[in-house]
Image (cartoon, grey):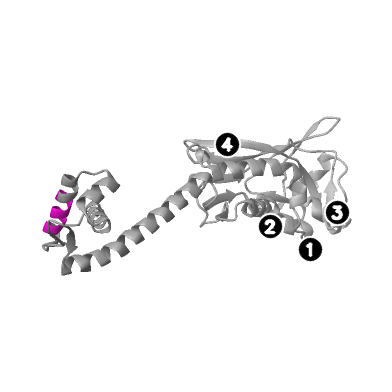
Amino acid sequence: MPIDLKLVEAFHLIVRSGSMTQAESQSGQSKATLSRALAKLEQQLGAQLLSRTTRKLQLTEAGRAFHAHCETLLAEVSGRLEAAHSEVQQLHAGTAGMLRVLCDPQFSTTFVCHVTRLYLEQHPKLDCQLDVAGQWHAPAADEVDCYVCEQPPDLPNLVAKPLGRLGYGLYASPGYLDRHGLPETPAELHRHRAIVSRDAPAAALLHSATGSANYAPARPAIVSNDYWTLKTFCIDGFGIALLPDFFARPEVKRKILQPVLPGWKPEQRRIYCAYQRQRYASRKVRAFVDLMAGCLADIESFNIYVGSGS
């Protein structure tokens, strides 16, 4: 039968106090209660721990051996409880633990990595697991604390908080345009090779100050679900790609990519942070979502990695 820790605590209190009267005074428990606890402990151990005289209580040989273990045991239990209490408080306060984040590929190294760095600098006792969606080993959206995405999945209890909007545009390499010519109207796009996102709609509606035009690539040279792959093939001159403006900006500044029909743009797309409703109660998740929303306005300054033209 397992020994009740309360019996051990009562025995330790009696020994430390030196008498039942003093133990009663220090603990607020009656002498009868303490005496019953001592008797039950002795019964479970099958040995007498204290010898009682009219003047004082004295440890038996078995009592001295057991008490030596008691002091170590109770000190360890107290230390572990204090550590557990501290850890629970830190987790509740959102200053410790693990934050699990999932993000779409176009936001990983270009945005989410940098926001996560800022977050970890503010919360040094927190760790982070950051996964990119679309990989076979990536967790599902309901298995992480939050998911940074363009299209939140339809899952029970999943809340999608809009962080802002992103502009998209058509881009190509100067080498490709030298070989195939620069389109001057949306109608001319049909004769160009396209680099297409597998997850994007088959057609996009482009808008300008003078009207709208449908863009439905007829000759995709490359189809991929990874934006870095799309941009790499675009840089290498395989065709025209529809890319997030912030994502193509570093290459445009270095003349590795060039805007195509910059006056014609699709509707801006929302970027979301999706999370389970119950997980948002965690302070660490709320702090990360708020930081993400605050940083979106500066997304172009976060995108520091530049593709290299051949």
The mark nearer the N terminus, 1 or 3, is 3
Up the image or down, 228 lies above or below 280; here it is: below
**What secondary structure is marked by label 4?**
strand
Q: Which residues are magenta?
A: 36-43
In 3D space, how far apart are the residues under numbered discs 3 and 4 (Cα atoms)?
33 Å
In 3D space, how far apart are the residues under numbered discs 1 and 4 (Cα atoms)?
35 Å
Q: Residue at x 86, y 30 (%)?
A: 210
Is there a contact, CB below 8 Å, between mark 4 and mark 2?
no
Please state which amino acid type lies under the numbered disc 3: Lys
Quarter of the image for the C terminus: give it.
Answer: bottom right
| Residue 78 badge | none
The mark nearer the N terminus, 1 or 4, is 4
In 3D space, how far apart are the residues under numbered discs 1 and 3 (Cα atoms)?
12 Å
Q: Residue at x 57, y 36 (%)?
A: 160
In 3D space, how far apart are the residues under numbered discs 4 and 2 (Cα atoms)?
27 Å
Is there a contact, CB below 8 Å, between mark 3 and mark 2?
no
**What secondary structure is marked by label 2?**
helix
Q: Nearer the viewer, residue 118 or 242?
A: 118
Give coordinates of residue 216: x percent, y percent.
72, 41
Observer able to see residue 284 = yes
| Residue 253 badge | 3
Please state which amino acid type lies under the numbered disc 4: Ala
Quarter of the image for the N terminus: give it.
Answer: bottom left
The mark nearer the N terminus, 1 or 2, is 2
The mark nearer the N terminus, 4 or 2, is 4
| Residue 160 badge | 4
Please state which amino acid type lies under the numbered disc 2: Thr
In 3D space, how far apart are the residues under numbered discs 1 and 2 (Cα atoms)?
13 Å
Residue 67 falls left or right of residue 51: right
| Residue 308 badge | 1
Give coordinates of residue 204: x percent, y percent.
71, 38
Q: Nearer the viewer, residue 277 or 143?
A: 277
